[in-house]
Image (cartoon, rainbow, N blue to C red):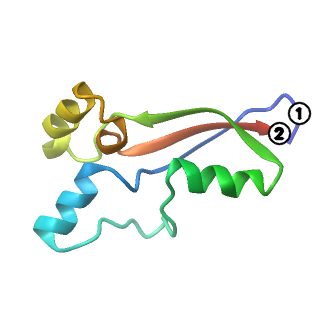
Amino acid sequence: MHKNTKLIITTPNVWCASNFFSILFRNRTPIHCEHTCWFCEKTFTQLIERFGLKVDNFHYLTTPAKVRFSLISRFLMSLGFKKLAGSALYFELSLK
């Protein structure tokens, strides 16, 4: 990786409210076959720092994973609960 390169990574948001609703009301964990780990901001940052990278920018993506949760997500976002409203995490990384 070149020193001026930015690496963009998105991951599912483990704290997303729609995940909790799926577990609570459907009795199943919403897992995609290609996602082998769930990260929060802290665990992902610790992982990438072990490999000489750093987080330059971080956001919760507010586009809900499922349409039926869009009203709930918008409501949570309006109250400032970005961690629960965002369906994904967005990271901009660079070399340390």
What kind of element bears circle 1?
Answer: loop
Q: Residue at x 11, y 66 (%)?
A: 25
Q: Which residue is mark 2?
A: 95
Q: Answer few, some or many: residues within 10 Å of disc 2's Cα (few below 14, many 20 plus, some between 14 and 19).
A: some
Question: Residue 8 sits in which quadrant?
Answer: top right
Snapshot quadrant of residue 80: top left
Circles 1 and 2 in contact, beta carbons < 8 Å: yes
The reply, left or right, for residue 51 in relation to residue 63 is right
Residue 18: where, in percent of width, then height?
23, 52
Q: Which disc number belongs to residue 3?
A: 1
Q: Left or right: where does residue 22 sit relative to residue 50?
A: left
Q: Residue 75: where, in percent of width, then height? A: 17, 31
Q: Amino acid at mark 2?
A: Leu
- In primary-sequence order, the first of circles 1 and 2 is 1
Residue at image coords 43%, 70%: 33
CA distance for labels 1 and 2: 6 Å
Q: Residue at x 22, y 73 (%)?
A: 28
